[in-house]
Image (cartoon, rainbow, N blue to C red):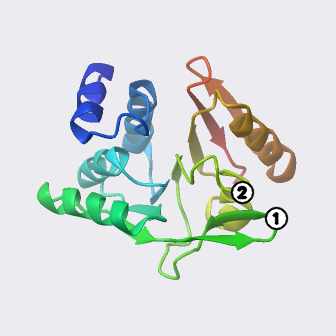
Amino acid sequence: MSRRTASRLLKGWHNEGFSADSAYLSAVMKYAFAARGNILECGSGATTLLLAATAERTGTRVHALEHMPEWRDRVRTALQRFSLAAEVHLAPLVQHGPFNWYEIPEQLPKDFALVICDGPPSTTLGGRYGLLPCLHRHLRGAVILMDDAERSGEQEILARWQQEFGLEFHIVEPGIYAVAKLPA
C-alpha cells in the first residue's frame, strides 16, 4: 500500500488524532503480507481493517485487543460492512503487578508471527510494556511493530524488552515506529 493510499484511508476513518502515521501503516501492510502465522494487534482501528483485508489474501488470522467497548463495536461494525474477518476481543485494562495491560482472553491463540503494537494508550500505567511480560511465550520468533517510537516512553520500553527478553530492535523513519524481533 502506498503512503498516499494509507493517508486517504486514515482521513476516511475520522480518527486523525489517534490514527497511525501513513509510513507506519505501509510498514504494517508490508509485514502483514509477509507474516506466516497469526497476527496480534494491541488496540484496534483502521489498522484492523487493513490487517483483515491482508489476512483475506494470505490466509492468516487477525486478533485485536481493545479495552473500550464502544471502540470495539465501531471496528466490528466496519469489519462487517466490508465483509472482513478479524477477531476484536474486548480486553479491559487490568493490573498486572507494577503495570496495567489488557486482560488476556482465554480464546487468544498461543502463537503469533506478527504483533502490531499501538496500544494501550501511553497514559496507561507502564504504557505498552505489558505485551512481553504477559505474552512473550506466545510470541517466540515474532516480529513486533511498535508505533510512536519517537516517544521516550516507547524507547524505554524497547530497551527494557531488549534487556529482559533478548529482543532485537531498530527504530525506523526518524522515530515513527520500531521493528523488533524476539528470539525463537
> From what the image shows, is residue 60 above or below residue 46?
below
Residue at the spot 52% in from the left edge and 54% down from the top edge: 113
> From what the image shows, is residue 120 above or below residue 152?
below
> From what the image shows, is residue 67 above or below residue 23?
below
Q: CA distance from mark 1 to mark 2?
A: 8 Å
Residue at the spot 82% in from the left edge and 64% down from the top edge: 98
Residue at the spot 30% in from the left edge and 44% down from the top edge: 50
Work out which residue is located at the far top of the displayed protein and give it.
174
Q: Which quadrant of the figure contains the N terminus?
A: top left
Residue 1 makes an appearance in the image: no
Among the 4 quarters of the image, the one containing residue 88: bottom left
Q: Which quadrant of the figure contains the C terminus?
A: bottom right
Image x and y of residue 81, in percent: 12, 58
Residue at the spot 21% in from the left edge and 36% down from the top edge: 12
Report the front residue among 91 and 49. Answer: 91
Q: What is the three-letter code of the residue carrying label 2? A: Leu
**From the viewer's perspective, is 124 left or right of 147?**
right
Q: Secondary structure at mark 2?
A: loop
Image x and y of residue 6, in percent: 30, 29
The disc label shown at residue 125, or none: 2
Q: Secondary structure at mark 1?
A: loop
> From what the image shows, is residue 142 above or below residue 168?
below
According to the picture, the residue beneath numbered tag 1 turns out to be 98
